[in-house]
């Protein structure tokens, strides 16, 4: 048996499954196949390290809330705080400033109210007959 | 190379694998499923499981070799 034929059996052997006797004999004697076997072991070791890192970085799962304890999603309490994106907060602040400035300018430009009296003089001829 | 760095490198090498092969290798290596269990889960013959595991391992091995460009022997530093 040559390496090309024995290659798939290296993976099977690594998994601890039975392989044909001639494949086993070749893998045991072949340096290239032994290297392949070692590489698989290292890949496996790294995968376990990766799995351990992922488990360590995963926050613990919380128990789901009891259906009776579930708070209503809406309406929120009047004093509840909500989070909004910074860009939205900045937009609101800008809108407030622009509106305030516009109102102040409009107020300053508006003429002050004055009392206007219109005097008319009418004669008796202007009167309509009853 | 520290184990964390090596694992991170492997994580990047995983990208070169087909998602199905990646999942299969993970189920075998990390979760410890047997060939028979994997065949039932994936609804494929055991021979397919074996060949796909071999393919996934070889894919990782070749990707590691290509990336590290070792002079000779194993790609594992």
Image (cartoon, helix red, strand yellow):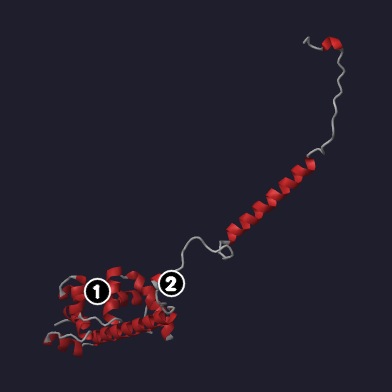
A55 and B3: which one is in front?
Answer: A55
Image quarter where the N terminus of chain A lies is: bottom left
Most distant residue in the left direction? A21
Instruction: Pinpoint residue B18: horizontal percent, then vertical percent.
Output: 29, 68
Instruction: Pinpoint residue B52: horizontal percent, then vertical percent.
Output: 22, 73
Protein chain holding label 2: A
Instruction: Pinpoint residue A73: horizontal percent, then vertical percent.
Output: 47, 63
Label number found at residue B43: none
Label number found at residue A69: 2
What residue do we see at 87% from left, 23% from top?
A119
Check the image and report above or below for A120 versus A71. Answer: above
For the residues marked 2 and 1, what is the alpha-carbon distance in whole angstroms?
Answer: 50 Å
What residue do we see at 29% from left, 81% from top?
B31
B19 and A68: which one is in front?
Answer: A68
Q: Tell me if residue A79 can be seen.
A: yes
Q: How many labels does the image show?
A: 2
Q: Which of marks 2 and 1 is in front?
A: 2
A51 and A104: which one is in front?
Answer: A104
Horizontal relation, residue A105 to residue A118: left or right: left
**What is the secondary structure assignment of the residue under circle 2?**
helix
**What is the secondary structure assignment of the residue under circle 1?**
helix
Task: Name the residue that disc number 1 marks.
Answer: B55
């Amino acid at each position: 048996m040559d390496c090309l034929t024995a290659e798939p059996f290296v993976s099977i052997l690594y998994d601890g499954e039975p392989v044909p006797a001639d494949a086993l004999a070749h893998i045991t004697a072949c340096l290239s196949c032994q290297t392949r076997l070692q590489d698989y072991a290292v890949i496996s070791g790294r995968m376990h390290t990766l799995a351990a890192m992922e488990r360590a970085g995963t926050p613990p799962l919380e128990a789901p809330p009891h259906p009776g304890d579930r708070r209503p999603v809406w309406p929120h309490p009047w004093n509840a705080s909500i989070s909004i994106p910074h860009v939205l907060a900045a937009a609101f602040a800008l809108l407030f400033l622009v509106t305030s400035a516009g109102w102040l300018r409009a107020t300053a430009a508006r003429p002050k109210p004055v009392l206007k009296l219109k005097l008319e003089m009418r004669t008796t001829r202007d009167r309509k007959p009853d | 190379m520290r184990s964390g760095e090596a694992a991170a490198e492997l994580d990047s090498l995983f990208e070169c694998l087909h998602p199905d092969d990646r999942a299969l290798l993970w189920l075998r290596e990390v979760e410890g499923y047997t060939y028979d269990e994997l065949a039932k889960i994936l609804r494929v013959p055991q021979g397919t499981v074996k060949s796909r595991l071999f393919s996934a391992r070889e894919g990782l091995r070749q990707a590691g070799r290509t990336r590290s460009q070792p002079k000779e022997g194993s790609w594992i530093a």
